[in-house]
Image: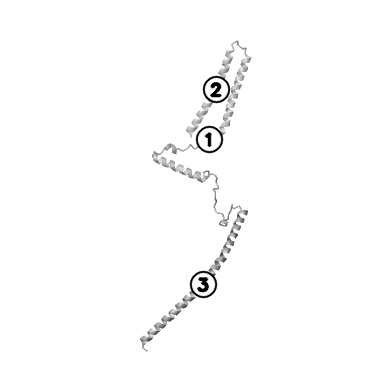
Amino acid sequence: MSSHETLSAAANDRKSRLAQLKSLKRKQEQISDAPETTESSATKDQAEPSQALTRTDDDAESSVVKTYLSGRNYDPETRNVKLGFDNLPISDPTNTLEYKAERLALETKAQQEAEKAEDKGLDLFKLQPKKPNWDLKRDLDQKMKPLHVQTDNAIAKLVRERVEAQKAIREKQPRDENTGDEVGMEGAELVEAMHLKEQEEERERKREAEEEDIS
């Protein structure tokens, strides 16, 4: 037997064995697929009641949670702590320091842009500083208010005493039949008292003006 014949016989033998192996493999796959289908149907039947049980358990638990918990800090849907807030904690969001600061910044920026648009020169009067004693004068004016009241009362008292003294002197003197002179004297005294008060106020204004010029 030649070598060519032996090689062809070996090739045919190998092909026949491969064909047998393929047929055996197909038979095994068909046998293994049949129990898998039965097992899958059985597992589905078992899973459906288990899922139904879990759903009923979840519904019962959620109803218990909603009944006994207020939900202020606990979220029953996520079963965790509630994060953030549903409604704003401030009733009026425009009444906050942040909002007012933002509005002030916007107004200042708009004012600066308006000044730039006008393109005016530098106003030296805006840069003029206040006098060094402006705060002292303010405090002094507050303290001098009761003194001004006392001064007015003292002037009124002096005028009243002077009028009463002159009236007593006239009562001691013999009266004339013409009473118009007496009325005229009282009116003149009142006018004189008013002049005295005006002179006092004028001196006070001059003194304040001199103090401002010195400062």
What is the x, y in percent for residue 203?
Answer: 52, 27
Kind of residue at badge 2: Met
At horizontal 48% and vertical 76% (from top left) the residue drawn is 27
Who's the residue at 43% across and 42% down the image?
110
Foreground: disc 1 or disc 3: 3
Q: Residue 57 at what x, y percent from top left? A: 60, 60
Residue 171's disc number: none
Residue at disc 2, secondary structure: helix
CA–CA distance in space, label 3 to label 2: 130 Å
Location of the N terminus by quadrant is bottom left
Does label 1 or label 3 sit earlier along the sequence? 3
Identify the amino acid type marked 1. Answer: Arg
The residue most toward the right is: 172
Circle 1 packing at 10 Å, graded few (<14), some (14-19), many (20+), is few
Depicted 125 relative to depicted 172: above or below: below
In-front residue for pair 41/139: 41
To which residue does mark 1 refer?
138
Q: Name the residue under label 3.
A: 34
Q: Which residue is drawn at 50% across and 36% down?
A: 134
On the image, numbered disc 2 is attached to which residue? 194
Residue 103 lies, in percent from the top left, at: 48, 43
